[in-house]
Structures are given as structure tokens and as C-alpha cells.
Amino acid sequence: MLDTRRVQTMQAGSWRTSDQTAAQRGYGYKWQQARAQFLREHPLCVMREAAGQVEAATVVDHITPHRGDQSLFWRRSNWQSLCGTHHSRDKQREEQRL
């Protein structure tokens, strides 16, 4: 039997639900290069560091959600390095409260 239930991971009306690809939303080659450079410069998860722990970061997160605003998207002062757990779990929870 096919399970057709889906977990709602994006809010209705989210800029992410558009018909655009990730590259069209800004996450193309230029982003991958900038992301790699940022992670080289900031290799540790800032949330783990704040807790006195050390873990390699794998994600460059936008501190203030850009919601498609390309000026905010590319503002490096709005970037932070996070481990996958903090980005996928804790940061997403935080954004859903906004």
C-alpha cells in the first residue's frame, strides 16, 4: 500500500515553494563557491561553539531569513556556519516561530 501522507516542511506561501529551481533562487555555482570559501574561513558550528563544544560546520545559514531578497541573501554579515543538526532542526524550529 502506498503511503501518501506528507510532512509539511514549508510554510504556505513560502518563497521556496515557487516553481523556481534552487539555482534560480540563488543557490547555483556562485553560491557554492561563496559557501565553500565561507566554510573554509569559518569551519566550526557557531551554535556548538556557544555551548562549549566543537563540531565542523557543513551549512552556511542566513541568520535573518532572506525569503528571496537577493541583497540579504548575499550579505556575508548575515551568514553563519552551522552543523547539519543545528541547521535542520534548531534553526528551522526558530524560523517557524517567526
Image (tube, grey):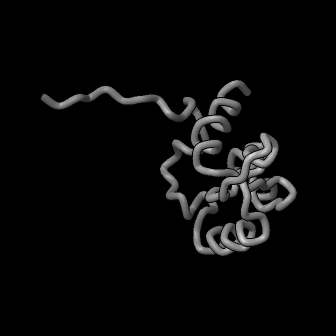
Image height check: is 86 above or below 9? below
Whole-percent x, y for residue 38 in the image: 75, 68
Image height check: is 78 above or below 2? below
Q: Residue at x 72, y 73 (%)?
A: 37
Number of numbered discs present? 0
Res 50 quadrant in image: top right
Res 13 quadrant in image: top right
Frontmost residue, 26 versus 88: 88
Whole-percent x, y for residue 35 in the image: 68, 67
Whole-percent x, y for residue 54 in the image: 72, 53
Image height check: is 20 above or below 86? below
**Residue, far left:** 1
Whole-percent x, y for residue 51 in the image: 78, 40
Residue 58 shown left or right of residue 71 in the figure: left
Q: Residue at x 63, y 44 (%)?
A: 87
Res 77 quadrant in image: bottom right
Q: Residue at x 74, y 47 (%)?
A: 53
Q: Residue at x 42, y 29 (%)?
A: 7
The quadrant of the rendering that contains the C terminus is top right
Image height check: is 30 above or below 88? below
Frontmost residue, 92 versus 72: 92
The quadrant of the rendering that contains the N terminus is top left
